[in-house]
Amino acid sequence: MTSEYSVITNSATQHFLENLRKSLDLNALADLVELSVEQLEQQVDMSIAEAMQTLSFLQGIPYEPSCRVLEVGAGFGFASLALASFGYQVTALEPGGIGFNQNRTISAHVLSVSGLHVEYLDATVEEAVFSEHQRFDLIFSNNVLEHIEDVEVGLQNLAGALGANGIMLHSCPNYAFPFEPHFAIPLLPVFPRLTRLLLPKKISESGLWKSLNFISYRQVRSFSRKANLFMAVEKGTMLASLIRLQSDAEFASRHKTLKRIVDNPLLFAVLRRSLTLPMSLATPMNFVLAHASPDLNWSKRHWQVIPPKNVSAAD
């Protein structure tokens, strides 16, 4: 990926997704997935907002038409299709599964309406099979890794599909910080799974809760060591999330408790103190994994690069 080519921009992404949204036949699709049109509209709009956030995460990455990209947990497919419209050769991995059973039906409809080509893999991250000649320049996910059954096996499989100079770029919660963002609830420190004993059944018995694996920074760092991969971790993610609460109405509507805290000067002052936590405790965690030292010059954000054990920081 070299800087002489075009890059992802928010304006181009928004224009593409707005036009695609207008093209969807939500009435027919609602019947297919057995939802009301209002429920489906809410899910589609939320998915588009998440796709915008995902693509903002990737903003600035230069591309050329030969670049191969894999989105892990593509959901309804909006981010993958936007990338295809930019010229990437896109593969979307979306198995559906617990709490996400409608994703493949909806994504198939969205794909057919778009008129673009995206290759879909209907498999879990752990079980997806990539050919020996199928190596990706960019693998990414947003709020997906916390839902896979075996984090280490999944990351190992993705690392095997990553090109020699490619990067994996992931964003997910860090459950070392005792907070669950999907439900906006505090967790028991150290033993977050046991929080289910204190929760109402509508949460603890839900597919979404059952899909959570409570991934942590320590777990990802341990994997990068064992896999002999470079790891880079973004600094300042907690502050960025608070800023998003103040500027993104859709995001704030899904995190009403946090929004009330941010709007309360005293509570916000207390929360800001947590922003000085070490990266191992900060949430969300945005991280890169790569076989070679990653070139992050395209990003305006701040990363700490952690080399493998056999490579010095100076290298």
Image (cartoon, grey):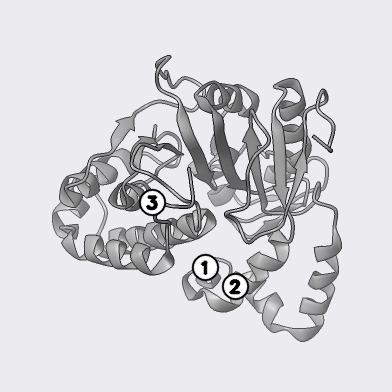
Q: Earlier in the sequence, mark 2 or mark 1?
A: 2
Who's the residue at 79% across and 48% down the image?
188
Crowdedness of circle 3 by 10 Å Cα count: few (<14), some, many (20+)? many
x, y percent for residue 270: 84, 74
Residue sticking out furthest to the bottom: 265
210 displayed left or right of 26: right
Q: Which residue is mark 1?
A: 251
150 displayed left or right of 94: right
Q: Which residue is mark 3?
A: 79
Residue 20: which quarter of the image?
A: bottom left
Q: Which residue is mark 2?
A: 245
277 up-or-down from 223: above or below: below
Q: Earlier in the sequence, mark 1 or mark 3?
A: 3
x, y percent for residue 106: 27, 46
152 displayed left or right of 271: left
Three-letter code for the amino acid on which mark 2 is drawn: Leu
Q: Nearer the viewer, mark 2 or mark 3?
A: 3
179 up-or-down from 125: above or below: below
Q: What element does badge 3 sit on?
A: helix
Q: What element does badge 2 sit on?
A: helix
Q: Are marks 2 and 1 in contact (CB under 8 Å)?
A: yes
Residue nearest the viewer, comparing 111 with 98: 111
Residue sticking out furthest to the front: 4
Who's the residue at 57% across and 28% down the image?
149
Q: What element does badge 1 sit on?
A: helix
Residue 240 in view (yes/no):
yes
